Image (tube, helix red, strand yellow):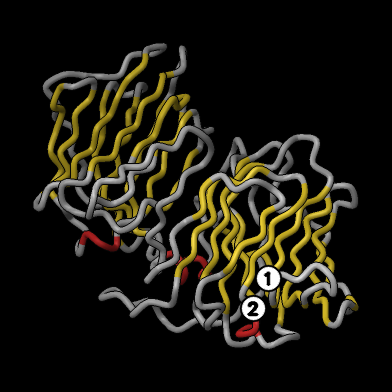
Amino acid sequence: MEQQPIYNPIIPFTGAIFGGLQDGKMVIIQGQVPGHAKRFAVDFQCGSSVKPRSDIAFHFNLRYDEGVVVCNTLERECWGSEERKKQIPIPSGSYFEVIFNVRSYCFQVSVNGQHFIEYNHRLAFNRVDTLKVSGDVHVNAITFRSPVVPPAYAPPAYTPFQPVNAQPAFSSSLAFSQFSQYNKETASQLKADFSFPTNRRRNRAKNTPTQVTVSSPMVPYQAYIGSIRPQQKIKVVGTVKPKPYRFTINLKAGYSDNIALHINQRFDENAVVRNSCINKSWSTEERGLPFLPFVPGQTFEVLIVVQPTCYKVSVNGRHLFNFNHRLQPLNQVDHLEVTGDISLSLVQY
């Protein structure tokens, strides 16, 4: 059975990793670094003993006071040699997602959709059974993903490569638009039920998937929403900026970066353009509408309902259009992206 996510843990947090670590297991942490942060750390421990201190197979420490990320291993209460990277991938004051992917030879770490580091094992990773998060950080969710059977759209075999520079989580020029080969591999395994930051409401009805509500996330916004399914509802509530150019809502396949549904409000063209992008090729645009729903300076609510044959989209309670499925199977669509000249009040999926 999959370990349930941990929401809003009190920091410092120490908790068990059910079943320990295996090749292909992932631990996903979402949260926010406060503006005054000096340091925070994530430790993969072999037990939870304080005295004597448990071995730490992987110590991942962001040191804002030094401008460096330090990785290390603690064995028999003695630290090994530090591995330092003079790059802080998470700006203070920003939201983040860190994915720790356990491989047979290393921990792979990606931050906000970009491969960041690999840390070769110094201790046997199958000894790890405890996760600790400490320091200057707010954690919204910790999600565990066990190794899964390759999907129908199985990705190619993993090929190690050199790390690339990570983009900030919510930079003004670009956010989450480029996925490394590493993250494309891991994204296909994610069925995340987490959110950035607060006011999470969970539907606890029997046999009903957990519903996630995200309040006032920053734009650009991106989240793993799990494999979509018929009758699933995705709600986006926001306000158009007073002098807008364009904004976009995308439903994507994280592994392939294909866009299943592209909703692009173009104020410069007085149009809402719908399209899909598969294998880096845009298909035929759809533009016809019964009315134009988005007005500069005004609040809107977009509701996307996944139907067996199409996406049914309404705005402010009025049906706007249907968009027939072009990318199938549907379960490869697992990513929501919102960019452009709007602010967000709520995202729900």
| Mark 1: secondary structure | strand
Query: Which label number is shown at residue 96?
Result: none
Say which amino acid is labelled 1: Phe
Residue nearest the observer in this picture, 52 or 101: 52
Relative side of 16 to 266, left or right: right
Q: Residue at x 49, y 59 (%)?
A: 143
Relative side of 4 to 29, left or right: left
Query: Which label number is shown at residue 128?
Result: 2
Say which amino acid is labelled 2: Val
Quarter occupied by the N terminus = bottom left
Of all residues shown, which one is farthest toward the left? Answer: 309
Q: Is 192 located above or below residue 339 in the figure?
A: below
Residue 304 location (% of width, % of height):
23, 38
Q: Hey, which quadrant is residue 87 in on the image?
A: bottom right
Q: Residue at x 40, y 28 (%)?
A: 246
Does residue 339 appear anywhere in the picture?
no
Residues at marks 1 and 2, CA–CA distance in whole angstroms = 6 Å
| Mark 2: secondary structure | loop
Quarter occupied by the C terminus = top left
Does residue 162 appear anywhere in the picture?
yes
Residue 15 location (% of width, % of height):
61, 62
Q: Are marks 1 and 2 in contact (CB under 8 Å)?
A: yes
- Residue behind mark 1: 44
Q: Is 243 located above or below residue 140 in the figure?
A: above
Relative side of 304 to 319, left or right: right
